């Protein structure tokens, strides 16, 4: 498999295949490049970040090309920001109001599901929480995924959202 496209999104910039395409925030990117998926506004920040990164990499492929794509993502903070937001809805016994809208996003792997649903991907989806960004570890997991499931394409990379000023999506798209 060969890398055919890559994207890096941080608070400062968005690089697609090595070219700076924007310095806008996640919601502004959605409005400029997608704009037609209302469920976006219900997603947590981690999902929005992963969704936009995947959208920009996968937008030129047909449904058939994406059908058996694999998605393998990594980060180090899991869904901690959303976990904390959810905790705030249940911490006070006098004002106990669990938020189902937040609870859905208290698993980091929901981002892979959101991407798969949007793009009608039926291939393997995995999410790994690791101690640090480790390109060689990520590549070894991707190699194993290719060997065990033989996807036509694989979308993989790092997606971590800690705060609105500290996030990173660094995805690669590989194809046979």
Image (tube, grey):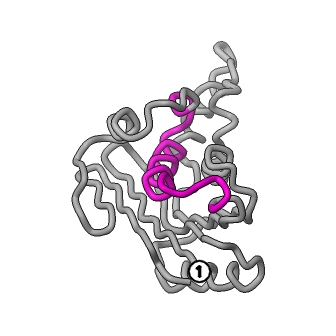
Pointer 1: what residue?
Answer: 176
- Quarter of the rendering containing residue 61: bottom right
Q: Residues within 10 Å of mark 1 (few under 14, many from 20)?
A: few
Q: Nearer the viewer, residue 77 or 171?
A: 171
Relative to 161, does residue 19 appear above or below in the rendering?
A: below
Q: Position of residue 88 (x, y in %)?
A: 57, 29
Quarter of the rendering occupied by the N terminus: bottom right
Q: Position of residue 15 (x, y in %)?
A: 29, 60
First to last magenta residue range = 40-65
Give the left or right position of residue 76, taking residue 68 as reference.
left
- Quarter of the rendering containing residue 144: bottom right
Does the magenta portion include 83? no
Residue 108 in sight = no
Does the magenta portion include 54? yes
Which residue is located at x 64 percent, y 40 percent? 105
- Quarter of the rendering containing residue 47: top right
Relative to 93, does residue 55 appear above or below in the rendering?
A: below
Quarter of the rendering occupied by the C terminus: bottom right
Judged by its main secondary structure, the magenta piece is helix
Q: Position of residue 23 (x, y in %)?
A: 22, 47
Residue 44 in sight = yes
Q: Position of residue 116 (x, y in %)?
A: 66, 51
């Amino acid at each position: 498999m060969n890398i055919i496209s890559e994207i890096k999104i941080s608070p400062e910039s968005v690089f697609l295949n090595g070219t700076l395409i924007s310095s806008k925030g996640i919601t502004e990117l959605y409005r400029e490049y997608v704009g037609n998926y209302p469920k976006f506004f219900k997603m947590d920040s981690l999902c929005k970040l992963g969704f936009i990164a995947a959208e920009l990499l996968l937008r030129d492929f047909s449904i058939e090309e994406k059908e058996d794509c694999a998605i393998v993502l990594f980060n180090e903070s899991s869904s901690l920001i959303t976990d904390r937001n959810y905790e705030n809805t249940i911490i006070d016994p006098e004002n106990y109001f669990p938020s189902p809208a937040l609870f859905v996003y208290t698993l980091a792997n929901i981002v892979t599901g959101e991407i798969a649903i949007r793009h009608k991907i039926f291939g393997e989806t995995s999410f790994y929480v690791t101690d640090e960004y480790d390109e060689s570890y990520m590549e070894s997991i991707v190699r194993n995924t290719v060997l065990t499931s033989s996807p036509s394409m694989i979308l993989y990379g790092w997606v971590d959202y800690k705060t609105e000023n500290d996030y990173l999506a660094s995805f690669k798209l590989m194809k046979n």
